[in-house]
Amino acid sequence: MERKERKIVVAVDESEESRYALKWCITNLMYHSENYKLVLHYVQPPPPPPYSFFDATGHLFAGGDFVLDTEKLGSELANSVMERAEAICRKLNTTNNINMERVIGTGDAKDVICSTVQKVKADILVMGSHGYDGFFKRALLGSVSDHCARHAKCPVLIVRRT
């Protein structure tokens, strides 16, 4: 009887905390197990509105060129984050059994991550924590991991960098 492939979604971004969570996941969840698919998930911020506006110095930004440049930069950043995450996987993958998939979303990270977890039918979501201690820091800066822990449709493992 063939075992069902389990899906582990790891939320990755530009931070050291997300890279640490990915390393922890590979070392502790996947290292001795088979039949896992690792879904690397990056969320880009939403694109700026497509109209023209003035910057702080009063220069007019033409909407079209600015939007295209911003989209290109966002795409380059997403590829850079994914390439770094895949390099971590290759470095830690001594058994060559990690089946990886890239998923790039756009929008508010907390909502996009929860939606993706549901779409791919993830068995677990692994995320890093920026370690915002205290009510005011979390309230002002927000906490994607707190939101996902409460709303994701699968277990959520929040890895805090020590």
Image: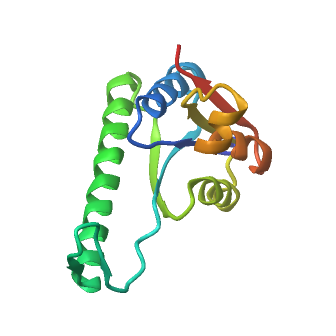
Task: Using the image as rendered, state which of residue 90 and residue 111 is in the foreground.
Answer: 111
Does the rendering let one see residue 142? no
Q: Determine the residue located farthest toward the top in the rendered image.
A: 162
Q: Quadrant of residue 125?
A: top right
Front residue of 44/5: it is 44
Q: Residue at x 58, y 36 (%)?
A: 127
Q: Is residue 33 above or below residue 156?
A: above
Q: Quadrant of residue 93?
A: top left
Residue 81 image position (x, y, % from top left): 34, 45
The quarter of the picture where residue 119 lies is bottom right
Q: Could one spot residue 44 in this view of the protein?
A: yes
58 horizontally vs 147: left or right: left
Q: Is residue 63 left or right of residue 13?
A: left
Image vertical order of residue 65 relative to residue 156, above or below: below
- Residue 143, given in percent of the width and then of the height, sits at 64, 41
Residue 117, how many percent across, how many down? 66, 53
Seen at 46% across and 25% down, the residue is 20
> Residue 145 in the image: x percent, y percent?
65, 40
**Residue depicted at 62% across the width and 58% down the height:** 116
Quadrant where the N terminus lies?
top right
Colour convention = rainbow
